[in-house]
Structures are given as C-alpha cells and as structure tokens.
Amino acid sequence: MFDFDHALITGGAGFIGSHLGDRLVDDCAVTVYDDLSTGSRENIPDDAAFIHADVRDDEPLRDAVRAADVVFHEAAQVSVQRSVDNPETSHAVNIDPLLTILEAARDTDTRVVFASSAAIYGHLRSLPIDESHPKTPTSPYGLEKLTADHYCRLYHERYGVDAVALRYFNAYGPRQQGGVYSGVIGIFRDQARAGNDLTVEGDGTQTRDFVHIDDIVEANLLAAATEEAAGEAFNIGTGDSITIRELAETIRDVTDSDAEIVHVDSRPGDIDHSKANISKARDVLGFEPTYDVAAGLDAYLG
Ligand code: UD2
C-alpha cells in the first residue's frame, strides 16, 4: 500500500509522529524533524534520520520537504489552553510552518498529510459531526488548525498540491504526555497510577470521541496512499463517544486503582459534546477504526 521512498515526519519525536515513524521505517526512508521541545529523542526510531530544528526555521524545513516524497506534518503546539495563554506563539507554530511546507511541496510534488483537529468545529450544532459541520472554533488553537486545514484545500485547488487534512478527534495511547497541558487520558492515567483523585471537570456529562493511536497511524497511511484524498479533509475518530465521567471510571477500573473521582470547576469555553461522523473516511480512504474506547484503554493501560 505504501509506495513512497522517503517520508518526512515533522514532530516525529512526539506522540503521534513517533508512532508513524515506527510504522514506516521498515517500508521507506524516514526523516524525523523535531525541536525536542515536547518530544523526546528516545521516541525516534533507530533507522530514521534526524533533523533537530524548529518548524519555524523555514530554510531547513523547506529543504527537508524537498528531499521527501511525502510529509506527515504532526509538529504543533497541541494544547488548547496554551493557545489561550499565548496565542502569538501558538499561531506562529501552528500556521506558518504548514505554509512553508505547502510552498516547498509546490516545487517538488511532495504529498502532504496534515494533522488537523476536531477543535475546528467548536460548539456542536448537530451530532455526529460530519466534515461540513459549521466551523466556529472556541480557541486560538481551533482557529489555527482551521486556517491550516483551509490552506491545504486552497493549495490543492490553486496549485495542485496533493495535500490532505486529517481532523483528529481525541487521540490517545502510549507516549502521550501527562501534565496539565496534556489530554485528559494522560492526566487520568497518571492520577490513577499515583492513587490521586481523578479530577473530572464540571459534571462529567461532556462527551468526547477517543481514538487510539494505532488507528490514527493507519488513517495517515491511507491518506498518503489514496489519490482521490488530495484536497480533501477527513474526520478521524471512532464514530462513538463516552462521557468524561465514564472515562474516569473506566480508567480507574483498567488500572486497578483505588483513586477517588472528584469534580472540580469546568473549563471556560469547554465544548459539551464531540463525536465524529467517519463515513467520508470510510468511503474514500477505506478507514476502519480497530479499537473502541473500552478495547483501546484496555490495550493501553490494562
Ligand atoms: C483535545 C486536544 C486538542 C484537540 C481536540 C480535538 C489535548 C490536550 N487537546 O482537546 O489538541 O485536538 O481534542 O477534539 O489533547 N478534563 C477533565 N479533567 C482533566 C482534564 C480534562 O475532566 O483533568 C475534561 C475537559 O474539561 C474536557 C475533556 O476532559 O471536557 C477533554 O479535555 P482534553 O483537554 O483532553 O481535550 P479537548 O477535547 O479539550
């Protein structure tokens, strides 16, 4: 299926990028581009080349894109909260480098697979969310991802760049970071393992569509290999959702923890519900998630 010679993975030392690297090193030459600001060197596969640089450095980035025949652009400022605290940095990391990549790809016919996000949709108008759902992001992060997502479409329409946007819902799995700026599964994992209270924000009835990293990786390979995907954007989730309260209970069970579940203040601007309609990814890419959240959490934490 994967007949590229050389893949560039920005953010290849991070959570999603490093899993992609592991999956690809046996199939093609892999170059990881990462500034190690949040990723770590141990995550980079032994057989991959490594460029230690910031994606805001446009010269090395441009050169790296030109040397590859496919780019998976996973490098990002991924925290919604950080984008609220420091919108200028978040904007600079999440938009300009993608534009550098698309400009370089115009010259060399490099294919681009971009890590977009469900955060572009903002508050829910209808469930499940399909790709044409209104887009009114509630954070700078969501707006940055939306802008970059549109650039992919525009560069395909205007310049014929083979760019695809994958709108990840809530990704989880091994190597996901913990700490206040990370996703809820990384936070509950660390709290449960330490026997600390699991901090459910608000009443816990808010829902999310949690998608396992292996399925995210598969979606990337399909997006790279599917010609008709160029210029398109796809939701990547499971098509199902659970409440945050249920998530806390499940994580406590699979980790065999005695931790208590407590409720703390809800997050300002938090979206209530999120669930992907993945029909388009199914129909065009042949994407089929292999893990529902119960099986995925069991494989990851059980
Ligand atoms: C996640 C991603 C974001 C984006 C989006 C796509 C992270 C950090 N953010 O945003 O990058 O791709 O998904 O849909 O991965 N919560 C608690 N207790 C905690 C932490 C969180 O109850 O200790 C709640 C939080 O209030 C929210 C839900 O869990 O209702 C999910 O929060 P999140 O930060 O994991 O993810 P989200 O959906 O804001």
Image: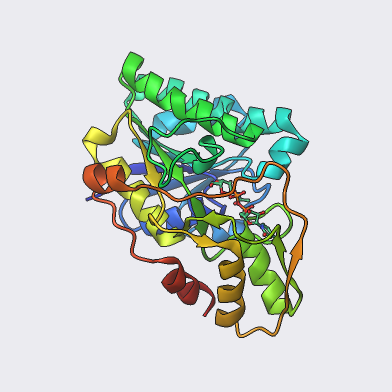
Residue positioned 40% across, 66% down in the render = 292
Q: Report the number of discs.
A: 0
| Residue 202 image position (x, y, % from top left) | 71, 57
Q: Is residue 221 above or below residue 138?
A: below
| Residue 269 image position (x, y, % from top left) | 68, 41
- 94 vs 286, left or right, is right
Q: Quadrant of residue 212?
A: bottom left
Depth order, front residue of 150/51: 150
Observer able to see residue 5? no
- 25 vs 204, left or right, is left
Residue positioned 41% across, 52% down in the render = 237
Depth order, front residue of 237/265: 265
| Residue 30 image position (x, y, % from top left) | 41, 48
How does the figure colour the protein chain or chains? rainbow
Residue positioned 22% across, 50% down in the render = 1
Observer able to see residue 131? yes
Depth order, front residue of 64/152: 152
Residue positioned 52% across, 80% down in the render = 302
| Residue 106 image position (x, y, % from top left) | 37, 20
Q: Is residue 190 above or below residue 280?
A: below
- 183 vs 66, left or right, is right
Q: Quadrant of residue 154?
A: top left
